[in-house]
């Protein structure tokens, strides 16, 4: 875990929410790191804890949230112990986050130009250089007539263009760590490809770490070096992207891969059942009610995260049996 090349380290993170007298265990003992220049992907169904984990990294959790256990460090600095000034500097200079909903993330009373220029604070840039870079970024994310659109407000943009404008604004700050929460949702495939190439290019140029939160394994395959699969607040599998996609060692991961539309498969598969309530998780492995490999021990004991290969981990009592179900998909 301790590595001088790690820009972010998270150890045994737990996040709970108190609501209507109940305790929602949204994230359970999650540990991971992001290296400089590396992209780590979080994948899983809605409600599994991906976005909650991402928000915890910049301390933007709701007031009813608590972190009963865990540690978050950025370049050796304890994020959970930062005061208001330290946190403001961290958010403004070190980390950037692309949110799912741009209308709530961007300021409706400020122009795109004003919000983008805020990202240039502390940089030795002339007004002409700021304008040139702002126009360039809007153009790179596929916004037509960028010179004109700079002086418009976010409500004047269509849904897809709002998302692209937010991505351009966040990348203008050249963060050391980018947290991207569903950055290509609702974008057509051409613009999605442009966004992926742009983030990958800036990641390489700045040696920027990226945490990508998504439900789309296709985007994971295009962007990420490693991937962690989440289910009901737990990591259930963690490996480099090619290994995980070509040789899944957890039944849930296998189910997600089988659900990818692919003409070669003929019939589109789905995972039976529904995700469990985080207020009342089932005893034992939280995935066992939906698992085709479920046995008695699965209903009684939560499996540990075990090593199943080089830098490959799975939270399954019968992970070693998954090889017989392996189905290779294209991870290039």
Image (cartoon, rainbow, N blue to C red):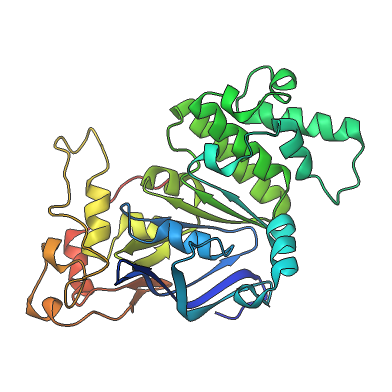
- Residue 149 is drawn in which quadrant? top right
Inspect this view and state whether residue 330 appears: yes
Q: Position of residue 283 (x, y in %)?
A: 16, 77
Q: Nearer the viewer, residue 43 or 67?
A: 67
Q: Residue at 37% of width from left, 47% of height from top?
A: 217
| Vertical comparison of 200 with 266: above or below | below
Q: Nearer the viewer, residue 184 or 84?
A: 84
Q: Nearer the viewer, residue 252 or 109?
A: 109
Q: Residue at 30% of width from left, 66% of height from top?
A: 20
- Residue 268 is drawn in which quadrant? top left
Q: Given the current orientation, which residue lies at the most extreme left position?
A: 296
Q: Is residue 226 left or right of residue 230?
A: right
Q: Position of residue 119 (x, y in %)?
A: 75, 45
Q: Residue at 62% of width from left, 33% of height from top?
A: 165
Inspect this view and state whether residue 327 appears: no
For the image, the number of numbered tags is 0
**Quarter placement of the C terminus:** top left
Q: Position of residue 256 (x, y in %)?
A: 26, 52
Q: Given the current orientation, which residue lies at the most extreme front position?
A: 20
Q: Nearer the viewer, residue 278 or 180?
A: 278
Q: Position of residue 8 (x, y in %)?
A: 60, 69
**Quarter placement of the N terminus:** bottom right
Q: Residue at 49% of width from left, 65% of height from top?
A: 63
| Vertical comparison of 221 with 231: above or below | above
Q: Is residue 2 left or right of residue 286?
A: right
């Amino acid at each position: 875990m301790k590595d001088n090349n790690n820009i972010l380290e998270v150890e045994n993170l737990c996040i709970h929410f108190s609501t209507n007298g109940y305790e929602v265990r949204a994230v359970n003992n999650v540990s991971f790191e992001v290296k400089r220049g590396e992209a780590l992907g979080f994948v899983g169904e809605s409600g599994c804890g991906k976005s909650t984990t991402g928000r915890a990294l910049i301390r933007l959790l709701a007031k009813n949230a608590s972190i009963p256990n865990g540690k978050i460090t950025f370049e050796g600095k304890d994020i959970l112990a930062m005061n208001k000034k330290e946190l403001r500097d961290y958010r403004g200079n070190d980390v950037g986050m692309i949110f799912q909903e741009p209308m709530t993330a961007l300021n409706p009373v400020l122009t795109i130009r004003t919000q983008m220029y805020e990202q240039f604070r502390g940089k030795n840039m002339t007004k002409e250089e700021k304008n040139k870079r702002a126009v360039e970024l809007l153009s790179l994310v596929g916004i037509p007539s960028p010179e004109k659109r700079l002086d418009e407000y976010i409500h004047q943009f269509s849904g897809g263009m709002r998302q692209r404008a937010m991505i351009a604004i966040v990348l203008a700050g050249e963060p050391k760590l980018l947290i991207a929460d569903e950055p290509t949702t609702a974008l057509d495939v051409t613009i999605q490809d442009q966004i992926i190439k742009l983030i990958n290019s800036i990641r390489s140029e700045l040696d920027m770490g990226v945490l990508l939160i998504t439900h789309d394994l296709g985007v994971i395959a295009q962007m990420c070096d490693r991937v962690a699969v989440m289910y009901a607040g737990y990591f259930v599998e963690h490996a480099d992207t090619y290994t995980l996609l070509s040789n899944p060692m957890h039944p849930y991961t296998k189910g997600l891969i089988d659900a990818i539309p692919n003409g070669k498969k003929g019939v589109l598969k789905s995972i039976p059942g529904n995700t469990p309530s985080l207020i009342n998780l089932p005893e034992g492995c939280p995935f066992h009610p939906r698992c085709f490999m479920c046995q008695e021990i699965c209903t009684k004991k939560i499996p540990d995260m075990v090593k199943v290969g080089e830098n490959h981990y799975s939270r399954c009592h019968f992970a070693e049996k998954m090889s017989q179900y392996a189905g290779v998909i294209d991870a290039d």
